Amino acid sequence: MDQQPPLVDPFLRAISYLRVSVTDRCDFRCVYCMSENMTFLPKKELLTLEELDRMCSTFVGLGVQKLRITGGEPLVRRDIMTFFRGMTRHLDSGALKELTLTTNGSQLARFADALYDAGVRRVNVSLDTLDAEKFAQITRWGRLAQVLDGIEAAQRAGLRVKLNAVALKGFNESELFDLQTWCAERDMDLTFIEVMPMGDLGNEDRLDQYWSLKDLRARLAERFTLTDLAERSGGPARYVRLEETGQKIGFITPLTHNFCESCNRVRLTCTGELYMCLGQEDMADLRAPLRASPDDGVLRDAIRAAILRKPKGHDFDYSRQAVDGQMTRHMSHTGG
Ligand code: SAM
Ligand code: SF4
């Protein structure tokens, strides 16, 4: 691969992290993410696996060192392992430092070994509750036992698992310590995500589900000694260590914290739209330049032009108890 100057945005932030949604489809219908009757994109709109490979490889050639594959549910995309195996060559060359994914865990029992063989070493599994009934309620279509089997398979395969739980008032508030203990027993880190005003707020009262992570953190502090960790991911996560268990707990608070100054990431949708900021509507279509020419130079120019439009920060604002800066797209579209 030709050596290219790295991607740097107008605020001198180097772009080293690409999140890629490989499908908008999912085998779950989590209430905060999708409606029950989703209309999915026609297949021809999606980037093919070859196009996804070319797209990601071009980003890697421009200095992206970390790829996180997401969706929808990435592991329901047909033949997705072909894509993962394709990315292995960038890990082997040293250009790519990390290949990882965020998954609901439903297909992990099938794919854990193959993911490990492709060079994946860590996975984030989204799980909000350990109660089978509540799990069925929140995911609508999910089965807890299947996810727990998936997590076990992933750990057996040698993958490091981190749990991501959306903090939901009146839903998993009561399970805070159960989740924390369950993870500690399995040597798993745990990150809480504040619920975001994504998708259509009309039929799900997401503001009513809002559980502030400040409050969650205060509750943890009643039982544990919390040490703030300096570690930053260039994203909206902050970490603490629970001294009594050694466990790392993360807090993703995109609404209440300003993390934009260190933002190192962009997001690609399954149709090839590049979102330069999770909280803003502006995006660049990369599918057209990708399909326009077999010459990667055209695509590279389009990527560089897009990065020059990366905004300084996002517009979310819950402060007046109204949903300002509300986004109309679903998390399953931009990949969370
Ligand atoms: N299907 C995979 C999964 O669930 O992990 C990957 C895609 S999912 C959109 C990525 C993450 O976004 C999940 O951890 C999910 O809980 C989170 N998410 C979805 N909708 C959200 C919302 N409205 N607010 C906060 N997090 C959300
Ligand atoms: Fe599917 Fe993940 Fe959205 Fe749940 S959060 S509906 S598992 S994409």
Image: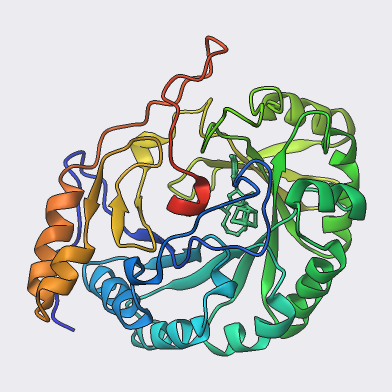
Q: Which of 141 and 284 is in front in this view?
A: 141
Name which residue lies at 51% across and 38% down. 199
Q: Is residue 38 left or right of residue 244?
A: left
Residue name at image x 61 percent, y 45 percent: 35
Q: Which color scheme does this rendered protein use? A: rainbow
In the displayed structure image, the side of residue 70 where residue 20 appears, left or right: left
How far across and how far down the image is residue 94, in percent? 36, 81
Does any portion of residue 245 appear in the rendered image?
A: no
Could you say which is closer to the camera, residue 45 or residue 305? 45
* Of residues 48 and 1, the one drawn nearer to the viewer in this rendering: 48
- Vertical position of residue 297 compared to residue 323: above or below: below
Q: Note whether 79 is above or below 235 in the view shown.
A: below
Relative to 313, residue 262 above or below = below
Q: Total of numbered circles in the picture? A: 0
- Image location of residue 17, percent across then percent down: 37, 59
**Residue 245: x, y in percent?**
84, 51
Residue 226 occupies quadrant: top right
Which residue is painted at 89% across and 51% down in the image?
Answer: 181
Q: In this view, does 195 lie to the left or right of 220?
A: left
Residue 109 in view: yes
- Residue beneath the point at 88% across and 41% down: 175
Spot occupied by residue 213 in the image (x, y as percentages of width and height): 68, 30
For the N terminus, the image quarter is: bottom left
Looking at the image, is 314 positioned above or below residue 20?
Answer: above
Q: Locate ligand 2 by image quadrant.
A: bottom right
